[in-house]
Image (tube, grey):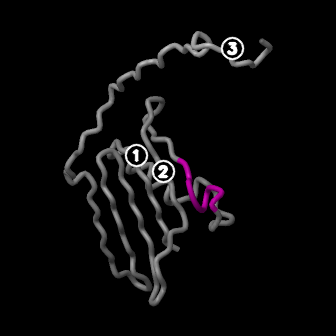
Amino acid sequence: MGYGSDEDSGEDDLRFDPPPRPVLDAAKVVAVAPRGDVVEHAFAVEAPGATLHFQIIQMRDQLYVWVGAGGVGEPPMHGELSMALKTRMSDTPAVTTLLGAGGTGGGGEGVGMTDCVSNQVAQRLAKRTGKCVGASCNIP
């Protein structure tokens, strides 16, 4: 009748409380048909010495604008990206460089954050539209 013997363990020792009942989540997953909330506009304009390429993607609460220039035989590039959005603190939208000239993404040595064209475009469009705006302007 020592410790660990069969006589010592009984069903009384193996009783556990019942597991807690699962809590029903208030969120429901509902399939939604696409309503055309994302619209893309892409076009190119011939300019002296280069072709300017534009891509604008409109979403419900966001706008993405890409502008790039490519010479003859040169593919368009994506060197900088900025984002701006309105805040309750100021009439001027907050803006930051995510990639490229003013930030740490590289590609724009010697260009200060205030000189980043993408910042200016994103900030102006965010102020006019009231949306979160991503802008990438890659024109030499």
Q: CA distance from mark 2 to mark 3?
A: 73 Å
Q: Residues within 10 Å of mark 1 (few under 14, many from 20)?
A: many
Say whether residue 99 is left or right of residue 120: right
N-terminal of the two: label 2 or label 3? 3
Q: Report the quarter where the N terminus lies.
A: top right
Mark 1 lies on residue: 132
Q: Amino acid at mark 3?
A: Glu
Tag 2 near tag 3, CB within 8 Å? no
Query: Which stretch appears magenta?
Result: 96-105
Q: Main secondary structure of the magenta part?
A: loop
Say whether residue 94 is left or right of residue 126: right
Mark 2 lies on residue: 83
Q: Amino acid at mark 1?
A: Cys
N-terminal of the two: label 3 or label 1? 3
Figure check: 66 above or below 72: above
Is 67 within the magenta?
no
